[in-house]
Image: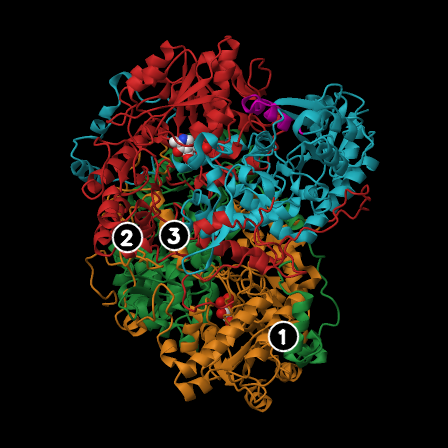
Chain colours: A green, B orange, C red, D cyan
């Protein structure tokens, strides 16, 4: 109620100007039969102070990473979100603007998106990036929609080591696209290039993840080569925070690179909102979904930015559009831009090396055997002597969340725990985890 | 660095242009442990050319970019169909509470009861608002809600063994509707709008058949008009065994007044960033929950948020589900804001819609003598004017009017949409605007109409008071430059 | 509402002009309990005319006012003597942590250990930086630090039974120094600056006597010059039994390089909002801790933050204390920021000062051929130029230069201070500025010198690109309007 | 370290331009004898993530009002700080600007201060306000300095019911001003007008507090009248949040009104930074300390704001200045402006009425006797059967901070507890306090 701005006097004047006696008259176009003849059954209005108190009480009932030492990852990571992000998120102009349809009103957000696109291209080694997809799942579906249009094949291949949620979303979307989904099982934690290549022979695209969901580094260049050789578009699902130390998908021949942007600049936030990124080789630019910002000049020849190649989009192309996406995840992607710019090339490399070093330490220090031999980036799958979910339950009683129970998604992995580290974990944190695991796995 | 002293908007260099080799802001923690070697070929060969900028310059950069961006916080933003209402700042505080912000989505349900309860309560409140019993919060935006809805239809009909391949939309439909139809694998059929701005019932009857899976409709329509025949429309579809989908983009007009479920819709999406005040963030994020009738509930995406006694949990054990449409249970931070918004109003949400409609009708009443009104009715929360008259008489287009509004410190309305109205100006003031802002808009629009006659070049060349003048959009599309080129790359990115 | 379409800075109405009877934003909670009657005469008779504004308009109002304000986040702000460095945004997060922000200052010591530890550690670090053993954090700003220091002197001499009534300051001293002297009940004596910019030792020797309580000195001075005779200066005062007070406003030049305690100062204040990055907030808040030698420690204000074993507590049991100079233990939020700042640098704080000095000398080197340099030496963290030449030759004053700088997007330096330099421009770049900003300033200053010769009226009439042009300051002072008049009051507030 | 912006190349170029080989040369003006020949003995540098973690750990060791139900007041109150305040505090332009010496650069902050001055004048019923003093203590000392200059009397009278910290600060400052301080004891919780009048006969000013520190409403109009009659300036120390329901000092003849602004728009923040306000009758305007903003016009005749009457100030008047204040509390005072504008006249009245109602409920509901008969605004002094500090200690073990032990400041009041309520407390909160007090006072 407190967000309305009209006074009683305003209302009276306005009704007079309209020429009606009451607001009800304006609603006469709503047939009587479909009117709600009662008040909405909603809890009573709260003033700001009471509302704040109520919601704070809800928030207090969650166990967050500030109160529990957490090794949860499995797609969402607690990399450090620097304070410069607050500048982006707290500026009312960014926060309360919408899609920059009118470029003269929105040069700032347009320029920022252009910078974001550049950063995504640099990291992935690609030529073009859109201005964001919903998340790391839907951008994989977007990649399939592109592949469907540039190929006459009607299958997509997913490595089983691709994030299960990503695979689920692709499977939800695929029937509408007229695509069949084939999955290629892992072999000891990673994907076999030959097996993938074989499966790809009928496929429009192949999607694999680097580092993969089981915490292993895939032989990504070999996977991409196998897919390409089979005539399928190789699509890498990657983690931006790894790309200071891991090779860019563009450098090993991928056609597209997609991923979940959360790790770069967004808080876990119980799953969202975050941003999905999607980058491609130049040849696919007119098939990309969503907003793309381009550079041009204004009437005075001054550099200016604008949404471009809009003939791809739903508001122009309608049923022939490359996607239905409209509202996207711009603000979150700009938080990503700020974070990556704050890190710079050195910082990003350092984050990657911290992850590598800590993951190695996890392997060596914890009283559990690694489930797979392949090297890790920031996650390690470990065998547990009792069900991993039970290990989680017990460890949490000691104030430590030891990681993700892979049995949630993979059959036969009930005794596998996926432990994640980021640069925010320390040696001492891993030591503490080792202690707790020793205690609860006895 | 110095260009044109006295210019209000100095040029803003790109981050990459501010970059200097060896400069940096962040220094991540180092664990003091050996870094293992990577297998050959996996290590990055060439470092990414991220900008190298110090923190002070980074802050100034984003401050400067914000200054070149116009938001609701800057001024009036009557962008039709987008519901650019005030975004309460309290919500930013709430979404940033550590108990929400730092909560991992894989956290065990018993350690996320506050978050789950919030989602469950939000579902309940949204259900009451739509007049439909079951809600999924998962979809990321309205468009994804649409797609989800269409997938639900497919699952529903498949389960019943019916083969239906066509979705009907209005000719006034938003572009997302037909785009979603295609993405969902359906065939599109369009129905016309009649002279009062309602669906043409004759045309509709002719098109609905046993192949029809359903209708997608925005009501009030993108013309800002409530479909007076909605009951008959629903009857036609239901009689044909088809379903009705409600595009909730315009829900702001009817909350507490008329519920989509009561209108006869079977599936509804909400745009949390429109009706329920999630800030638009320069393009997003949004939220597109979907509500459905009992009969469609079994197909909703997983996970669902369910209540058992006093406990809440995520439930993925739904054999008939269409599956998952995005990660986790949805954009949780958006839910915090929507929840807070609804709790701030309570049942007085109705008043929100009443004022949204009052504000729109006030503008309509005060502008109808200078701009053409294609459908002569009271409007709902928005209305569409046509600049056709100005075009004919003075050669001034809707775009010219839009650009000139900028000089009056006002964000232009949506233009050239809906397609059925030539030179369309689609105006949505929202309920949070005070009368003075509305009057300021009226004055500006009237002044512009006057200028169109007196000095049309002022409008053709507008804007005059923004960081840039009108852009060469053709060049942007014909010679696309879609990333910074580091003084080395080709002018065109799209080589192929 | 519409004034001058296309103007970059539309007029900003006052909150009171945005007010409409019956409008409101906040709705405080109501306990649902009867409100007791107040005794006659105590109840407010006429409600205060606070603005009546909705929340959306309130947000827009402050957004618009921020847009009309230039900060370090906006651009280069070389305001001499004020150390307008970058303010890390992390500090705002930290000061807002509930454990700090929502901590009541009367909370029991055992329930405020984190806050007390932070203060104790800050004291220790500040002590190391000043080279003096005991620190009070209490003073609210540099000026209050000065006053506190003078009170300490009085207490010290009183305790020793000495009667001393005079404080000596330099002729380059900041205005707060003499003002503090008077407020502390001392007599003021001024000593001159010699040709190299040092204190004139002969003059000094002549003025120091057994009536002298002490010296107040800024070192480096407000000329940006380190007093090369500081050791002799200290000797003169100490030999006379007097004390030396260090005005820490310019500490940014010498952290880790030379410590006031080692220079011979007995009492030192820090400006946390200068050297240690507390944001200046449009005028404040600040923080003005004071460090002293052992001999003066007993007189420090209460409460003191002390450590006992692993515990920290506030101690007010200090029989010789001068008493309290403000509420509680000081501006705690400022301490959080200063603490974080020092912890971010660690011993590399020295590098901070080195770069501050490097930046200043670079500007000096690049501007000395176009503006006069009154003291031909390397400077420290700031330097003073004179526009005397421009004035003489082209009739262009330091003020004109300052106003014209605005058109180049740069905040003017401090002007007409210190008083010993005519047409002074006092320039302090700080360590956080990148070379490009310095070069931009050089270019602007050189361009302005050129403009002064070519088109002086451009400078007299500057600024041209700000929300307002030059102000009628005489009118402001002669016909003071110091509050909104609600369309009723007299034009002048000051009737008397 | 991460806040510096120069690269090695920059440094080299700059040194060359200066004509020195190293930065050390620039420091040659510092005599060798006073140079620090070693590194500073400070803990090692922390990166942002580590620093954040360290400081968060310190913060976590404080028991704040989010984790303890608190009835602490005694000068600092937890009135609700609305979210619009965040707009003021988070805008970099307000945050990182300094005193608006150059009005063309600072119209925004100048206008906001002008609005603040107006709001303070309205609330206090005064003609002029400055742009803020340090806090509620130092503005009382400022008032004495004004009184000293407009009177030839050399005493100031303080009611004993004036906040003890305020009195202490006045006593610290007074000797420098050449003023003697006389205190007038309370009589049953309030000040006797006759006694005050008698004491004021030699006084330049009289300062009393409304509502007073003991939680009682003073007969403020009578006190002001007594002071005025005795030829002393009546100065009221007031709480902005009370002025929606309590009479404005200007309405009952005060010459000055001062106070602590914290309750309006600032968090407790362990004591600061907050703002002190100081308002006066017009005749004193040229004696006011600190910044004052005035309205004028620019060269085009456009309304504009500027610092004015600067001949009062230290940078112009030096040893003859009305004060030495320079840096003040602008940002905090603007948070106050935003809060008071958010409340508006109705909201402020409602806050006041909520306080009155809850204080009355405290009186009736708690199992302790009020120490004084005078009515309360938002604080009530209660007699405890054991030492109040012991009651505090015990109640805190139940998660409730019951209030301030007045024995900390007042002799003979070891058994008096000062319980504060604001509109953020509820009936249920008071009930809970009643329960705990019943338990611990057994
Ligand atoms: C009528 C209509 N339908 C659908 C959409 C798509 O919603 P979203 O942007 O949330 O994806 C919009 C939004 O622009 C709209 O206006
Ligand atoms: C040299 C000098 N001394 C003293 C002060 C006063 O310090 P503060 O503003 O912190 O009261 C200043 C600040 O302006 C200054 O520059």
Q: CA distance from mark 2 to mark 1?
A: 51 Å
Q: Earlier in the sequence, mark 2 or mark 1?
A: 2
In x, y percent, where is residue C456?
A: 26, 54
Q: CA distance from mark 3 to mark 2?
A: 13 Å
Please state which of residues B159 and A238 is positioned toward the viewer in this rendering. A238
Which residue bears the numbered disc 1?
A: B265
Chain letter of disc 1?
A: B
- Does label 2 lie on the same chain as label 3? yes
From what the image shows, is residue B426 above or below residue C220? Answer: below
Residue found at x 63% / y 85%:
B236
Q: Is mark 1 within 8 Å of ligand 1?
A: no
Q: Which residues are magenta?
A: D163-179
In x, y percent, where is residue C474?
A: 44, 49
Q: CA distance from mark 1 to mark 3?
A: 44 Å
- Does label 1 lie on the same chain as label 2? yes
Secondary element at image label 2: helix
Q: Residue furthest top?
A: C161
Q: Residues within 10 Å of mark 1 (few under 14, many from 20)?
A: many
Locate residue B340 relative to residue C392 in the image: left or right: right
Q: Residues within 10 Å of mark 3 (few under 14, many from 20)?
A: many
Locate residue B73 relative to residue B452 in the image: left or right: right
Chain letter of disc 3?
A: B
Which residue bears the numbered disc 3?
A: B62
Secondary element at image label 1: loop
Q: Which secondary structure is most common in the magenta stretch?
A: helix
Mark number displayed over residue B16: 2
Residue A159 painted magenta:
no
Chain letter of disc 2?
A: B
Q: Earlier in the sequence, mark 1 or mark 3?
A: 3
From what the image shows, is residue D78 above or below residue C402? Answer: above
């Amino acid at each position: 109620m407190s967000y309305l701005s009209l006074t009683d006097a305003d209302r009276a004047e306005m009704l007079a100007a309209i020429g009606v006696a009451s607001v009800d008259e304006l609603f006469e176009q709503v047939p009587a039969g479909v009117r709600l003849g009662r008040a909405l059954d909603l809890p009573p209005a709260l003033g700001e102070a009471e509302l704040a108190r109520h919601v704070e009480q809800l928030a207090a009932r969650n166990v967050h990473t500030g109160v529990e030492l957490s090794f949860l990852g499995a797609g969402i990571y607690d990399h450090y979100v620097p304070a410069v992000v607050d500048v982006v998120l707290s500026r009312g102009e960014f926060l309360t603007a919408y899609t920059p349809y009118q470029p003269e009103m929105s040069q700032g957000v347009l320029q920022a998106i252009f910078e974001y696109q550049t950063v995504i291209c640099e990291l992935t080694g690609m030529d073009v990036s859109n201005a964001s997809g919903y998340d790391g799942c839907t951008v994989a579906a977007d990649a399939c929609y592109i592949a469907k249009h540039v190929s006459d094949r009607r299958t997509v291949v997913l490595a089983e080591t691709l994030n299960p949620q990503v695979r689920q979303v692709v499977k939800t979307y695929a029937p509408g696209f007229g695509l069949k989904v084939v999955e290629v099982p892992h072999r000891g934690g990673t994907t076999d290039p030959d097996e993938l290549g074989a499966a790809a022979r009928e496929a429009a695209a192949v999607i694999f993840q680097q580092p993969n969901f089981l915490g292993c580094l895939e032989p990504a260049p070999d996977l991409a080569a196998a897919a390409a050789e089979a005539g399928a578009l190789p699509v890498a699902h990657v983690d931006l925070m790894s790309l200071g130390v891991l090779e860019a998908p563009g450098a090993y021949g991928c056609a597209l690179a997609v991923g979940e942007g959360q790790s770069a600049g967004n808080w876990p936030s119980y799953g969202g909102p975050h941003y999905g990124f999607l980058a491609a080789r130049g040849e696919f630019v007119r098939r990309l979904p969503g907003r793309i910002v381009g550079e041009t000049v204004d009437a005075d020849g001054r550099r200016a930015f604008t949404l471009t190649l809009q003939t791809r989009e739903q508001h122009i192309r309608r049923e022939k559009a490359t996607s239905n996406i409209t509202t996207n995840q711009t603000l979150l992607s700009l938080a990503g831009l700020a974070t990556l710019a704050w890190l710079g090339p050195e910082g990003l490399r350092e984050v990657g090396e911290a992850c590598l070093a800590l993951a190695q330490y996890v392997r060596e220090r914890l009283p559990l055997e690694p489930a797979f031999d392949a090297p890790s980036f920031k996650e390690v799958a470990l065998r547990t002597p009792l069900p991993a979910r039970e290990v989680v339950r017990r460890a949490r009683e000691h104030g430590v969340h030891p990681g993700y129970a892979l049995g949630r998604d993979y059959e036969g992995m009930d005794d596998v725990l996926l432990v994640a580290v980021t640069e925010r974990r320390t040696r001492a944190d891993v030591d503490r985890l080792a202690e707790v695991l020793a205690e609860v796995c006895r | 660095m110095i260009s044109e002293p006295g210019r209000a908007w100095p040029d803003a260099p790109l981050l990459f242009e501010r970059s200097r080799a060896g400069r940096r802001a962040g220094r991540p923690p180092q664990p003091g442990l050996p870094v293992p070697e990577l297998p050959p070929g996996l290590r990055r060969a060439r470092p990414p050319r991220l900008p190298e900028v110090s923190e002070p310059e980074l802050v100034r950069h984003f401050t400067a970019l914000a200054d070149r961006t116009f938001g609701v916080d800057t001024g009036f933003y009557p962008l039709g169909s987008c519901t650019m209402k005030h975004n309460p700042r309290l919500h930013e505080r709430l979404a940033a509470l550590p108990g929400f912000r730092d909560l991992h989505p894989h956290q065990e349900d018993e350690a996320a009861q506050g978050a789950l309860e919030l989602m469950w309560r939000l579902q309940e409140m949204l259900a009451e608002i739509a007049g439909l019993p079951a809600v999924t919060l998962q979809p990321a935006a309205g468009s994804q809600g649409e797609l989800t809805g269409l997938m639900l239809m497919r699952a529903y009909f498949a389960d019943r063994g019916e083969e239906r391949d066509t979705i009907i939309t209005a000719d006034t439909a938003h572009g997302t509707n037909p785009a979603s139809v295609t993405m969902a694998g359906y065939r599109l059929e369009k129905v016309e709008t009649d002279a009062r701005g309602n669906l043409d019932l004759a045309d509709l009857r002719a098109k609905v058949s046993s192949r029809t899976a359903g209708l997608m409709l925005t009501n009030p329509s993108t013309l800002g008009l409530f479909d007076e025949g909605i009951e008959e429309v629903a009857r036609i579809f239901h009689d044909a065994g088809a379903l009705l989908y409600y595009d909730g983009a315009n829900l702001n007009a009817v909350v507490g007044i008329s519920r989509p479920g009561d209108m006869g819709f079977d599936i509804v999406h909400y745009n949390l960033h429109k009706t329920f005040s999630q800030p638009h963030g320069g393009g997003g994020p949004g939220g597109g929950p979907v509500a459905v009738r009992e009969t469609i509930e079994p197909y909703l995406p997983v996970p669902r948020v369910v209540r058992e006694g006093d406990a809440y949990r995520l439930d993925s054990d739904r054999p008939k589900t269409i599956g998952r449409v995005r990660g986790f249970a949805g954009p949780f931070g958006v839910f915090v804001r929507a929840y807070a918004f609804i709790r701030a109003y309570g049942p007085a949400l109705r008043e929100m819609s009443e004022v949204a409609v009052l504000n729109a009708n006030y503008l309509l009443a005060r502008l109808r003598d200078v701009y053409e009104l294609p459908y002569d009715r009271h409007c709902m929360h928005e209305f569409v004017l046509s600049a056709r008259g100005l075009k004919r008489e003075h050669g001034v287009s809707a775009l010219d009017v839009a650009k000139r509004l900028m000089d009056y410190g006002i964000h232009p309305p949506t233009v050239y949409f809906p397609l059925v109205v030539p030179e369309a100006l689609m105006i949505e003031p929202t309920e949070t605007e005070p009368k003075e802002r509305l009057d300021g808009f009226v004055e500006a629009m009237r002044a512009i109409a006057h200028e169109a006659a007196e000095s049309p070049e002022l409008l053709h060349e507008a804007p005059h008071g923004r960081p840039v003048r009108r852009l060469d959009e053709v060049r942007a599309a014909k010679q696309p430059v879609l990333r910074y080129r580091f003084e080395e790359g080709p002018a065109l990115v799209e080589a192929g």
